[in-house]
Amino acid sequence: MNDDNNLEEQYVKQIVSMGYSEENAKDYIKSQKDVDETEIDPNLGLENNKDEVEIKLPEINESVFASSTSKILLPSEREVNPYARGLAILLLIGCLAGFLNGVDYLSPTSGIIRPHELIYAQASGAPEKSSIFLGTVILEDGSPAENYTINIRSERGGNHFSITDSEGKFRIENLTPGLSVLDIAIVEEDNTYGISHRMLLNPPAGFEPFGFTQMDLVFPGKNKFGTDNGTGVFWIDYTPEEMEYPLIDPSAASYYSIVGYGFIGIATLGALLSILAINSGNLGLIRSASVMVFFSMGPLYSSCCIGLVVGLLSFMIPNNEGF
């Protein structure tokens, strides 16, 4: 009897290796016993050689497992719920919006959202005297601009002065974050040469007590200045052309680009999950992709809305064996 059980177990294992369930294999063996109404063949198609066991099965057709209580469905044969597929397609649209949002962040001087707007918004609520401005002024030939006057003026913070050292460096503290005008000037032979820039001073980040703004500036040559109109003052005012894009700390633009790459990565991962969900209708993939889409934001928070709506709708779809 033990030999019969061992042979039957080997027969079951062989049928399972062909892609059928253990229950189907046992049903098939039982059906063969019932047909013969005798004890199971001791060999069951197995040769006597115990070292090399070869199982010979009859040809299997669609009626073999007609009495089985369950049907085996391969992933490629399962029906995809049309509602789940529709949600996955909607997520792809959200991923595209999130990708475009990341590209927008990579262009700090164009697009819908710019670092200037973020810095200005954060600076509006920042405390006064919480910004520090430092940098270097050089001449067109690359030499340091020594003993040049640096003046920062703003409506909230008033005027603050400094003088560049022998290396053209300067540092001004107790400034108020936000929009300011930067004046750089030098007096030579009773004539004053100066330039004006419109700039944004960084507010403190996180729990830091001060925000730092660092810039390297170039002072133009005397041949770039126009007439003094008899006043002895030669001045170049760059502020009109910097109304929309004032000068900002280059590192702020770099951080802004890093955020853009992050949005692109999240949107790309969400798109891969969405494509898999379109083919399988898997609700787990749809919900995971909706989270990715939500955090990719999208222009004007469009991806946030799509991700949130799809995530909620996914719980209204029944999660049965078909999809």
Image: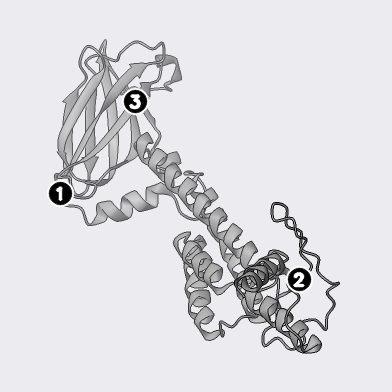
Mark 3–mark 2 distance (CA, rounded to whole Å): 88 Å
In this picture, residue 223 sits left or right of residue 310: left
Q: Nearer the viewer, residue 211 or 222?
A: 211
Q: Quadrant of the N terminus?
A: bottom right
Tell me the residue at 31%/21% (across/down): 137
Callout 3 secondary element: strand
Residue behind mark 3: 216
Residue 33, by quadrant, is bottom right
SS category of the residue bearing label 1: loop
What residue does disc 1 label?
A: 128
Q: Point out the tag, 2 or 1, that comes first from the N-terminus.
A: 2
Residue 300: percent from the left, percent from the top? 48, 64
Q: Quadrant of the C terminus?
A: bottom right
What is the distance, in whole Å, between disc 2 and disc 1 at their CAs? 91 Å
Disc 2 marks which residue?
44
Distance CA(mark 3)–CA(mark 1): 24 Å
User: Picture coordinates of residue 131 (x, y %)?
Assistant: 19, 41
Q: Are marks 3 and 1 in contact (CB under 8 Å)?
A: no
Rendered image quadrant of residue 70: bottom right
For the residue marked with disc 1, what is the amino acid? Glu
* Residue at 33% in and 32% down: 196
Q: Is 190 left or right of 280, judged from the image as shown?
A: left
**In the rendered structure, which disc, 3 or 2, sits on the residue that comes first in sequence?**
2
Give the crowd class for mark 3: few <14, some 14-19, many >=20 residues within 10 Å.
Answer: few
